Amino acid sequence: MANSPSARKRIRTNEARSEINNARRTRIRTFIKAAENAIASGDKDAASAAVKAAMPEMQRGVTKGIFHKNTVARKLSRLTAGVKKLA
């Protein structure tokens, strides 16, 4: 157990931040899943709209430090390639 006041505060802060980060990570994964499902359905318009909606969320995840930039770049590349393949 933490003894110093600063360590107690750090525990509280970490719990609050982890809740926010988990919610953000879940939201981003939902966007990715929606884009993947749209690509799998074969509807090009829906797929491109889903990928366009997912892009800023994924980039925001990078700036907030939730995902590594290369991970997001790889996922975005694969999603856009999937949309391109539908054309």
Image: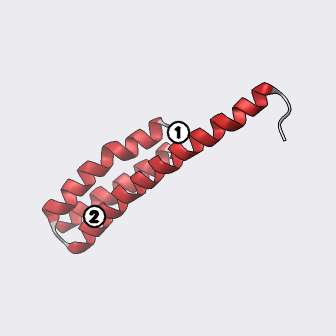
Q: Give the amino acid at mark 2.
A: Gly
Q: In this orientation, which residue lies closer to the viewer: 85 or 76?
A: 76
Left of 71 or right of it: where is 33? Answer: left
Q: In this orientation, which residue lies closer to the viewer: 19 or 69?
A: 19
Q: Which residue is mark 1?
A: 65
Of the numbered discs in the image, which one, if any, rests on residue 82? 2
Q: Give the amino acid at mark 1.
A: Gly
Left of 18 or right of it: where is 74? Answer: left
Provide the secondary structure element on which disc 1 rests: loop
Q: In this orientation, which residue lies closer to the viewer: 47 or 12?
A: 12
Q: Residue at x 22, y 73 (%)?
A: 41
Q: Residues within 10 Å of mark 1 (few under 14, many from 20)?
A: few
Quadrant position of residue 1: top right
Position of 2 relative to 68 (above/below): above
Of the numbered discs in the image, which one, if any, rests on residue 3? none
Residue 13 position within the rendered picture, expressed as x and y whole percent measured from the top left: 64, 34
Is residue 8 visible in the rendered structure shown here? yes
Provide the secondary structure element on which disc 2 rests: helix
Which mark is nearer the camera, 2 or 1?
A: 1
Is residue 87 visible in the rendered structure shown here? no
The CA span between labels 2 and 1 is 26 Å
Q: Residue at x 52, y 39 (%)?
A: 65
Q: Quadrant of the C terminus?
A: bottom left
Residue 74 position within the rendered picture, expressed as x and y whole percent measured from the top left: 42, 53
